[in-house]
Image (cartoon, rainbow, N blue to C red):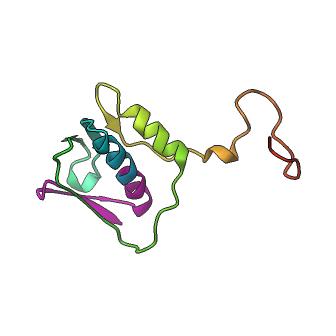
Amino acid sequence: MGRLVYDSRLDVDFEDRLLGHLQVVIGTKLGRGESFYLSWKDLPAVGSGRTSIWLHPASALRFRYASADRVVLNQAWVRRWIADSYAPGGLRLTDEPEPEGDRPPRTGTPAPSPRAPRL
């Protein structure tokens, strides 16, 4: 279980996999100078509500991981969260989607054979 520390006043525990993706999204947004809300559902132990924080380029953040291993990123999840972050309510944490390579193409064309060259 990893931890996001916001402004030295709020510590939030997240699974390492989620936290790794969140770090990439936050780093991308703040690196562009973009501020946004980040929201998540609270665990029953802290009231089963929802928490939102305002993230801006001057935010003091720390990402602490339980494991020393790097997270293998699901690019579909990163892209979804970046797109979602532009909504008026900001980024709401969602479950991980299937990696794009595991789905058939959206065009309705059959998936290529594993032995067929990709063009």
Q: Is residue 108 left or right of residue 85?
A: right
The x and y percentages for residue 85 are 35, 34
Q: Nearer the viewer, residue 51 or 70?
A: 70
Residue shown at 41% from the left, 75% from the top:
68
Quadrant of the rendered image containing residue 112: top right
- For residue 18, side relative to residue 11 (left or right): right
Q: Is residue 9 left or right of residue 106?
A: left
Is 78 positioned to the left or the right of 11 in the image?
Answer: right
Residue 104 in magenta stretch: no
How far across and down, in percent of the image, does residue 32 sit?
31, 39
Asked where in the image residue 90 lies, by quadrant, the reply is: top left
Residue furthest to the left in view is 9
Residue at 54%, 51% in the rendered image: 74
| Residue 23, above or below 37 | below
Q: Quadrant of the C terminus?
A: top right
Q: Position of residue 67 (x, y in %)?
A: 40, 73
Q: Magenta stretch: give its range.
A: 1-22
Which residue: 21% across, 48% down? Answer: 47
Q: Specify the farthest residue to the bottom.
A: 68
Q: Position of residue 36 (x, y in %)?
A: 26, 35
Q: Nearer the viewer, residue 49 or 28?
A: 28
Residue at (48% x, 39% y) in the render: 79
